[in-house]
Image (cartoon, rainbow, N blue to C red):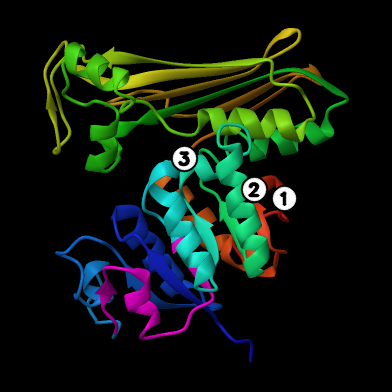
Amino acid sequence: MVEKIRVIQVGMGQIGCKIARLILEKHHLELVGAVDIDPQKAGMDAGQVIGLQEPLGFPVTRDLNGTLQCTQAEVAVHSTSSTFGQFKNQILEMLAAGLDVVSTSEELSFPWIRHQEDAKELDVSARQAGKTILGTGVNPGFLMDTLPLMMTGICEHVEQIDITRRINASTRRASFQMKIGSGMSLEAFYAKMAAGEMGHVGLPESIGMVFDTLGMQLVNDTDEVEPILAQGLIDTGFYQVQPGQVCGLKQVAQGYNEKGIFLRLTFIAALDLDKEGDTIRITGSPDMMVELKGTHGDIATRAITVNAIQRVKDAGPGLLTMRDIPIITWR
């Protein structure tokens, strides 16, 4: 009988709770601990926090040490924050505790260009500990980097890659609707833009992964965000948005080589958005277009995160990205 991989879920927000539930469904995994700084969750049975009818028999603790005093584990699934300044010390703590790490933190998906020194520190720490770190997710981590990179494998040459993701945010969780500015005035939206609090995190990381993997020099990159305004009243159950208020955003990031734009990433998320889906266009030999329907961000993120656990457990030590490991599959 194959021993199950013992997993701790760090971060019990909506995504973290759904990841924890999926871990429980996998026969080769065992959820043995849960961590969250929220005092309202700390001390509660983890089963209650993730919405189960039956208790799991262990509490959510406010820190990793509290969980490790009660159980042993091999892997931490990390789902707390997007930016290096918030999560780097958390990752270092997990490595020091002897855990491999699978993280949904966007800036960890390919940190070697924008956060080179931090990435080097994590890589060295992981190698010294003999452990593996992987940043993954649907975007960044798959749709706008790993998948189009795989598609270039059947090309004789590539001149340009264009990827567009369109999300109907009315079907998404309240925190996502808030993140795209739902119900804001234009003034509030632009104020948050100026403070760096608006926009999708991860497009520059996808650009970095594509350019670096293809061995191309990134001459320049841009990342611009603009609001989308409601044309009529929108009521999602979480937000009631008046005409003229912000109901979403359009973000375009572009990576330039010496000839001009090589990679364009367009991210559109808005309430009541039509024509939802993902499109990947490659100009080259041959010209190709792939359209994906039904790629629900929350489902895809928790699936690829949980499905990556075995790959990370089998991988060599260091800070890895999705290009560095074998193809992740659901079994």
Indicate the amino acid at tag 2: Thr
* Quadrant position of residue 245: top left
Instruction: Evaluate if marks 1 and 2 touch, with contact meaning CB atoms under 8 Å apart.
Output: yes
Q: Image check: 180 left or right of 92? A: left
Q: Which residues are magenta?
A: 58-77
Q: Left of 36 or right of it: where is 208?
A: right
Q: Where the C terminus falls, by quadrant? A: bottom right
Of residues 247 and 130, the one drawn nearer to the viewer in this rendering: 130
Neighbours of disc 3 within 10 Å: few (<14), some (14-19), many (20+): few
Residue 245 located within the stretch drawn in magenta: no
Above or below for 81 versus 194: below
Answer yes or no: is residue 138 visible. no
Front one among 185 and 120: 120
Q: Amino acid at mark 3?
A: Gly
Q: Residue at x 75, y 10 (%)?
A: 258
> What residue is rendered at 42% in x and 50% in y?
87
Q: Farthest residue toward the bottom?
A: 1
Q: Which residue is mark 1?
A: 324
Q: Which residue, given by chain and number where applicable, does mark 3 sit on?
A: 294
Q: Is residue 99 visible?
A: yes
Count of numbered badges drawn on the protein:
3
What residue lies at 61% left-to-right and 38% top-to-bottom?
Answer: 116
